Amino acid sequence: MAVKQMLAQWNEFTASLRAERFVDDQFSQLKQLQDESSPNFVIEVVYLFFDDSQKLIDEMGRALEQNSVDFKQVDDNVHQLKGSSASIGAARVKSWCVAFRDFCETKNLEMCLRCLQQVRCECVLLRSKLEYLFTLERNIVEAGGTVPMME
């Protein structure tokens, strides 16, 4: 595939990521921190986010399965996930964390379990989307092109 076609595909895909709120301006700002001295910066940060978020999600799941749920601990984990999702621009994950925290505050176990499932799904979807984006970018570079900045 020609670089021009790949760039058009990249532009369309990044526009859809933003339109569907998978990522926000913070993701664009994160990408601007990447340069020749750290060409894999964004990939490394994003994969650290996914590793950490999986651990937090697993912890929340275990906590919500207990006979006596420690909603404060669950809320602390959700707060941490909300902060890290905000820092990479994972808008939909962050948005679900906001709702999740509200249900932790009211100790609504059923809704906490629903939010946990939704956060888990959003993380899986986001990972799939960003892996595709990174593949597109790698293909553009390998074909001799330059990946533009996200707007």
Image: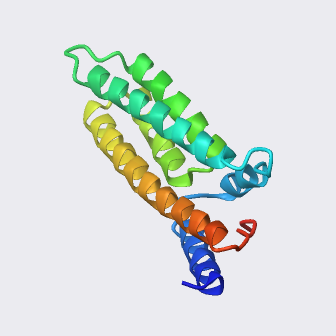
- Marks counted in the figure total 0
Q: Residue at x 73, y 70 (%)?
A: 146
In the image, farthest residue toward the left: 67
Which quadrant is home to the N terminus? Answer: bottom right
Residue 64: percent from the left, percent from the top? 28, 25
Snapshot quadrant of residue 58: top left
User: As displayed, is residue 31 above or below residue 136?
Assistant: above
Residues 115 and 134: in front is: 134
Residue 102 placement (x, y as % from top left): 46, 35
- Residue 60: x and y, percent? 35, 27
Classify 70 as above or below 120.
above
Whether residue 21 is visible here, answered yes or no, is no
Q: Is residue 70 visible?
A: yes
**Quadrant occupied by the C terminus:** bottom right
Q: Residue at x 56, y 53 (%)?
A: 91
Image location of residue 105, percent across then percent down: 44, 27
Name the image colouring: rainbow
| Quadrant hosting residue 114 | top left
Q: Nearer the viewer, residue 132 or 92?
A: 132
Drawn side of residue 61 relative to residue 49, left or right: left
Q: Residue at x 48, y 57 (%)?
A: 131
Please identify the quarter of the rendering in which residue 62 is found: top left
Q: Residue at x 78, y 54 (%)?
A: 32
